[in-house]
Image (cartoon, rainbow, N blue to C red):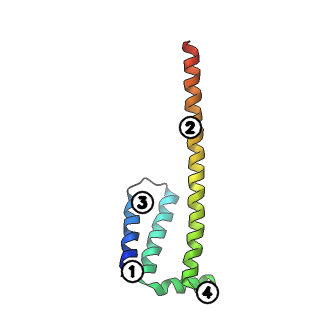
C-alpha cells in the first residue's frame, strides 16, 4: 500500500517537473531523482545495495543523506533566485524613479 502511494507521489512529482522549463543541469538532477525514487520504491533492496557501495550502513540512511543534500541545493537555488529577482526589481524601480524625475 505505501509503495503504491510513494510511486504515485513520485510520478506526480515527475509530471510537475515536466510541466516547468528547467535548465539542463536542473532537468538532469530532477530526472535522476525521479529514476532513483522509482527504483527504490519498486526494488527496496536496491537502496541497501547502493548504500553498501557508498559505505553507508543502511539504505534508509543513504536516502536521508541524499535528501539533506538535495534540500540544501534546493534552498541555495531559492536563495540565489530570490537575490536575482531582488536585483531585477531594484533596476526596475531605479529606472522608474529616473523617468519620473525627468518628467517633472
- Asked which secondary structure carries label 1, the reply is helix
Give the image quarter of residue 58.
bottom right
- Asked which secondary structure carries label 2, the reply is helix
Give the image quarter of residue 67.
bottom right
In the rendered image, the quadrant that contains the N terminus is bottom left
Determine which residue is flagged by label 1.
3
Q: Find the distance from the CA under tag 4 to the CA under tag 2.
A: 46 Å
Determine which residue is flagged by label 4.
57
User: Which of the marked residues, 4 or 2, is nearer the chain's N terminus?
Assistant: 4
- Asked which secondary structure carries label 3, the reply is helix
Determine which residue is flagged by label 2.
88
User: Which of the marked residues, 3 or 2, is nearer the chain's N terminus?
Assistant: 3
Where residue 44 sits in the image (x, y, percent)? 46, 84
Determine which residue is flagged by label 3.
17
User: Tag 4: Cα neighbours inside 10 Å, few (<14), some, or many (≥20)?
Assistant: few
User: Which of the marked residues, 3 or 1, is nearer the chain's N terminus?
Assistant: 1
Q: Residue at x 36, y 72 (%)?
A: 8
Amino acid at each position: 500500500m505505501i509503495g503504491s502511494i510513494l510511486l504515485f507521489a513520485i510520478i506526480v512529482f515527475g509530471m510537475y517537473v515536466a510541466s516547468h522549463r528547467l535548465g539542463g543541469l536542473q532537468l538532469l538532477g530532477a530526472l535522476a531523482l525521479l529514476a532513483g525514487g522509482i527504483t527504490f520504491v519498486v526494488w527496496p533492496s536496491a537502496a541497501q545495495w547502493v548504500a553498501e557501495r557508498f559505505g553507508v550502513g543502511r539504505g534508509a540512511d543513504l536516502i536521508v543523506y541524499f535528501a539533506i543534500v538535495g534540500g540544501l541545493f534546493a534552498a541555495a537555488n531559492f536563495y540565489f533566485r530570490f537575490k536575482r529577482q531582488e536585483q531585477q526589481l531594484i533596476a526596475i524601480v531605479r529606472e522608474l524613479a529616473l523617468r519620473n524625475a525627468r518628467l517633472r
